[in-house]
Image: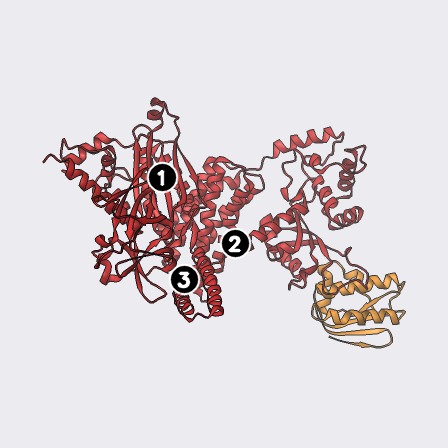
Chain colours: A orange, B red
Amino acid sequence: MSAMPDQGRLLLDGELNIYTVAEMKPRVLELLATSDAPCLDLSGVTELDTAGLQLLILLQREAERAGKRLRCLDPSPEVESVLRLCSLAERFTDTPGATA
Amino acid sequence: MSLDSAKQTFIDESRELLAAMEDALLTLETVPGDPDAINAVFRAMHTIKGAAGLFALDDIVSFTHVAESVMDRVRDGEVSVDEKLIALLLGCQDHIAELLYAVAQGAAQADPDLLAGGAMLTDGLCTYLDRPAPDEESAEAEDTARQAVGQTSENGESGVQSDAWHVSVRFDRDLLRHGFDPISFVRYLGTLGELLHVELVDDALPAAEEMDPESCYIGFEIRLSGALDKARIESAFEFVEDDCTLTILPPHSQVDAFIALIQELPEDDSRLGEMLLACGSLTERELEEGLRLQAAGAPDEPGHLPLGEILVGQERVEPVLIDAALEKQRRAREAKSREARAIRVDAAKLDELINLVGELVIAGASAEVIARGSRNRRLVEANASIVDLVGAIRDSALRLRMVEIGETFNRFRRVVRDVAQELGKEIDLVITGADTELDKSVVEQIGDPLMHLVRNAMDHGLESPDVRLAAGKPAKGTLRLNAYHESGSIVIEIADDGGGLDRARILAKAEARGLVQPGHAISEQEIDDLIFEPGFSTAEQVTNLSGRGVGMDVVRRNIEALRGSIALGSRPGLGTTVTIRLPLTLAIIDGFLVGAGDGAFVIPLDCVVECMKYDPRESAEQDYINLRGQVLPFLRLRSLFALEGAPPRRENIVVVNYAGQRIGLVVDRLLGECQTVIKPLGRLLSHLRGFFTGSTILGSGEIAMILDVQELIHAAVARDAAAHFSSSEPS
């Protein structure tokens, strides 16, 4: 999984699962720390398992705590399927440009 | 592993499960509600069904499925265990055994008769499936309970509205590390039924600094509908049983069940209530009422009524709800006991190991001799510790072959039950000494003779209830199986409190057959022993079981082939006891080495009582000495084996014992203890079997013969009897 930061926007590309979460955790947290309007582009996520989902949930919660709003954009079909399964679709989908 | 060997393992393990199932069913006869026994039967059916599915053995799968469903209802308390059910299940167990046998034989298609028998059993089982759960009683009990708490709930009689299953699961931290993915379980549930709602519980997720991305902090509250049963839902989580806390609430469960769940789960109560609402498993009204009921119960403890009191009388509440923590403990315990169970070892490999250990013992002994000769102290010490270790390995290896006789004894529980029913007799089987160990190969061969003796006791020994009552005995007869160790042997007793042997009849038959001369003086014990003669049976009716007259002599031959002995004691009107003695180990023994003439002989150490100097002047003409006031007959090895040369000036007597009988053996030299590996005599020397149980190679390279103490004692007794006889015959 690679992540390309771009002014507060992190593009996640590849698998977000048990194998990659350890590496990704500091990077997504860094995104949160360095940006006021952190944005996660989920279009490139090819696989999302529980570990990956957990990380997303953590990030969202940390964002709330920091008073920031995390935006998750363009979830790939895999991501959408997992979110739908766990009744989390609303919590995580966001369309670019939409306001709170 | 090839398919064939996998299948063989399946068959072996299934047979073990069937044995456990039989045991459990017999327990349920006396304790119908025993939860461990019920679980054992369920587990047997469940596991065999699953494994049979892997091999596409459809007949077994469909048959066990019915039994499993019935047992599931029993587990849930919807069906209670009665005699008819036990008989049915015992029949099922037999049927499955036959199906397994057919598989083992490689039968392509099931025998139609077999299938027909199975169909009958299935029909019988189905009546238990169709039986309704005890609804009415539980509804009444609920009302009483509610009135006692001063509340009536409109939902009380039929449970919550939700007609779907509620599944609550919390996963352990290490679940992800073990390679599992909770989302995949939820997906799988979605294939079993319809996921009406899935609520992810992330309350346990810590702050970012503490959160370990590879740990699992989540759980789920799930509402699931479909044609399901609890077992199927549980099976979805089978592989992670130990790594999660699972609670399943069936449709229309009691509100209190949900309240209990809320209280047990770690999250905040109101959070949980919200989640259950979100799932749709509870309506707002139900939740409010339930919490109110709960709070009203104990005025001095606001909001907390002991769960037990709420749940009393609600027979519909699943046991799993009582305490999720206890459930987890139980699973942990079961998992531990699963791990503690033995591993399977190929018997041939074990024999190979013991053979090698035997060679090691011999090699160690010869090294010891050389070391001593070298007079190198450090070498001697080093060698001594090697010999010690070899001895420990030897003991350990031999113990591997030892199995408890309890397993064999337990097989008879079923036999006794069935035969007692057949004969219309009441028989109690009492087993003691079940943990007495004996060699595996002996255990295998002792089964058939024991079976015959047990059947004899039931058929001929124990009387029918009216005869017993008329004789002033309790109507129920007792059959005792006992086992214990004694002087290097294992002793097995089969005793009954029946009528004992009918000596008059035995004598009459013996005379008719010409075995005994009429009018000849014969002792009671000798009459009893006549039943060991071939073709001897005085049973008036040749029953299904015994009485064909092929019995006791074959039994004795089988036991003697194991280097054992069998003896019988009978008291008229009181009962009969059969005593079997068998050697403990067949491969390596501790021995006591003695020399006579040029040769060395080994006496099994367990048989040696004491040694002392022998003074030939004391017993020049006679073959016995006075040992502390008792007569001790003795044998001179020199004369017995016609050894050449003159005896030394100082001879020794070794007092040996077997089965309570003692004699002395006069030898030249006492050479101390030794470990020996028994080498069988082989064909060339088998005619010597009389006094030797085998030979062995000493450290010096010499060969020593191992003495058969039992035979020597027989010889001494026979010699004395002959002497007595000849001296008492009218000349």
Name the residue tied to disc 3. Answer: B354
Callout 1–callout 3 Cβ contact below 8 Å: no
Residue type, mark 2 in image: Arg
- As helix, strand or loop, the secondary structure at mark 2 comes to loop
Classify mark 1: residues with Cα within 10 Å, few (<14), some (14-19) or many (20+).
many
Tags 1 and 2 on a common chain: yes
Total marks placed: 3
Disc with the residue nearer the chain's start (3 vs 2): 2
Q: CA distance from mark 1 to mark 3?
A: 32 Å
Residue nearest the observer in this picture, A27 or B20: B20
Name the residue tied to disc 1. Answer: B494
- As helix, strand or loop, the secondary structure at mark 3 comes to helix
Residue nearest the observer in this picture, A97 or B616: B616
Residue type, mark 3 in image: Ile
Q: Quadrant of the C terminus of chain B?
A: top left
Q: Quadrant of residue A78?
A: bottom right
Q: Is residue B76 above or below residue A95?
A: above
Q: CA distance from mark 3 to mark 2?
A: 23 Å
In the image, is B471 to the left or to the right of A46? Answer: left
Q: Quadrant of residue B363?
A: bottom left
Find residue B28 and name its label.
Answer: none
> Residue B596: x percent and y percent?
27, 57
Q: Quadrant of residue B471?
A: top left
Q: Chain of mark 2?
A: B
Tags 1 and 3 on a common chain: yes
